Amino acid sequence: MSSHPIDATSTSAWQDLSAHEAELHADLRGWFAADPARAERLSFPLADLHVDLSKNLVTDETLALLVRLADEVGLSDRLQAQLRGDHINVTEDRAVLHTALRRPAGASPALVVDGQDVDADVQAELTKMFAFADRVRSGGWTGVTGERVRTVVNIGIGGSDLGPVMAYEALKPYVQDGLEVRFVSNIDPTDLAEKVKGLDPRTTLFIVASKTFGTLETLTNARLARDWLWRELGTEDTDEARNAAVAQHFVAVSTALDKVAAFGIDPANAFGFWDWVGGRYSVDSVIGTSLAIAIGPDAFREFLAGFHAVDTHVATTPFAQNVPVLMGLLNVWYVNFLGAHTHAVLPYAQYLHRFPAYLQQLTMESNGKSVRWDGSPVTTQTGEVFWGEPGTNGQHAFYQLIHQGTRLIPSDFIAVANPAHPLKDGETDVHGLFLANFFAQTKALAFGKTADEVRAEGTAEDIVPARVFSGNRPTTSILAPSLTPSVLGQLIALYEHITFVQGVVWGIDSFDQWGVELGKKLALEIAPAVEGDTSALDAQDPSTKALIAKYLELRG
Ligand code: F6P
């Protein structure tokens, strides 16, 4: 592999895409009218998912040029490099092997990276996590008073929170009766205080989830939780009682088992993973211990199988039919050629209500970069803002802007055919009504409503412009049979690979996150000033100093 990324803007495909864009007059109405097979031709299977790309602002020529772009930037080589464990996370000199986390047991040939049998390591840790999950689920694992666990509290932030909480919410119907998981992430003490409210310490298990075991928020919350436990159990007085409480009510998930021990958690009660798993790519590692407890090992294995099905698709399907590759390339098309700044993800499935938040870390921490992986400046715009809310809530909030605003907002609509709760309103199947909205929105966005159509409804002429919908607002529709653990794994893996494809085109390292470091460091430097240390306060810039002084005044 070359030690420099190929500059996408210097490829002939890029030049051809620019010329093509200048001549392209997006006309979804016309394109569908002239080509009745468009929907079928531009819809693709991806494991259990049906993905319809036909309402995107592309012709067959656009897609062919985008696929050529993928070829010219060496996407195939880069993908193989990732899958085999090359150190493509160059700024941290690490392999990027989240795909190894979901390889099936006994996969052949074994994946050996840097001399280590990765498959064996992954299976060993999964076996350990599943055995623990079974003990908690069966009541075999108890607290110090001998009572079984009823509530698991996951303490983590970023990738050690967003994945587990999103998946737990998504898979609620699979959660064992009598078990609940809560999630504490924010260092705002309100978060911990609210999450332990009403809990019985005798039946509460804390999981401290931190890849590095050095994250300020997580370690602070873990100490607050430990204090709460000791206080509520009445085990504050002796070291023995305190240690016994921690041993039965705290486990950890980390790559830094030495730091776990320093915190007071027995490494025997810790589950490990590896530096080649990025935090935002870790929900399918032991970072998902809370989820494994909630839904059980069998469902967790199905979850992993869903990821793997998409990994297999990505690795083996020609780019012209390769769904994550096409969706990643479409995003490049919108960002770099059509000027999109943001991308909406709109799940028509209430259980996916945290999916957009999860994707924000996955996509924006990965692709929010201004230099390429060799340190040179990027030559194009990079990561777009991902955002969204579940339908139909979003419809009554921000869809106005997507339909009639001045900005282009490519949107992914995600729905499941079979609901967990097939409720009826009289004779009406409410899920059907819900999905009628899903179909209606993508239709309205694509085809709009002309002035003549508005007039034909008898609208007064001066109101007509306000009631016109331009159409040609691009959407992708993703339809799944139902929200199973496997389908959730498929959806996550789909977006992981989309993110990867975009990163390769832009030549960036999608697996580091240096952009979060400066703020963390400054917070530690500023903390003494906030505590009233005047020399630390004096060392601040005038605005920060004045703000802290105002804060101290308000605190009295
Ligand atoms: O600050 C960003 C980050 O490093 C994320 O990438 C990561 O998911 C999160 O912090 C939490 O890190 P850790 O799991 O090491 O506590």
Image (cartoon, helix red, strand yellow):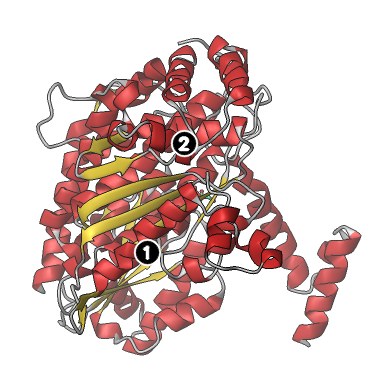
Q: How far apart are marks 2 and 1 (CA)?
A: 24 Å
- Please state which amino acid type lies under the numbered disc 2: Gly
Q: In which quarter of the image is residue 547?
A: bottom right
Q: Which of marks 2 and 1 is in front?
A: 2
Task: Give 153 or 318, whichever is nearer the viewer.
Answer: 318
For residue 163, which quarter of the picture? bottom left
Identify the residue under disc 2.
30
Vertical placement of residue 19 versus 341, above or below: above
Residue 351: % across, % down: 31, 66
- Residue 537 against residue 316 in the figure, above or below: below
Local secondary structure at mark 2: helix
Q: Quadrant of the C terminus?
A: bottom right
Identify which residue, 214 or 459, lies in the foreground: 459
Which amino acid type is marked by label 1?
Answer: Asn
Q: Which of 390 and 438 is in front in this view?
A: 438
Within 10 Å of disc 1 (Cα), the crowding (few <14, some 14-19, many 20+) is some
**Horizontal and vertical percent for residue 470?**
58, 50
| Residue at the spot 71% in from the left edge and 66% down from the top edge | 462
Circle 2 crowding by C-alpha within 10 Å: few under 14, some 14–19, many from 20:
few
Q: Does the residue labelled 1 lie within 8 Å of ligand 1?
A: no
Could one spot residue 378 in this view of the protein?
yes
Residue 51 picture location, percent across and down: 30, 41
Quadrant where the N terminus lies?
A: top left
Residue at image x 61%, y 23%?
23
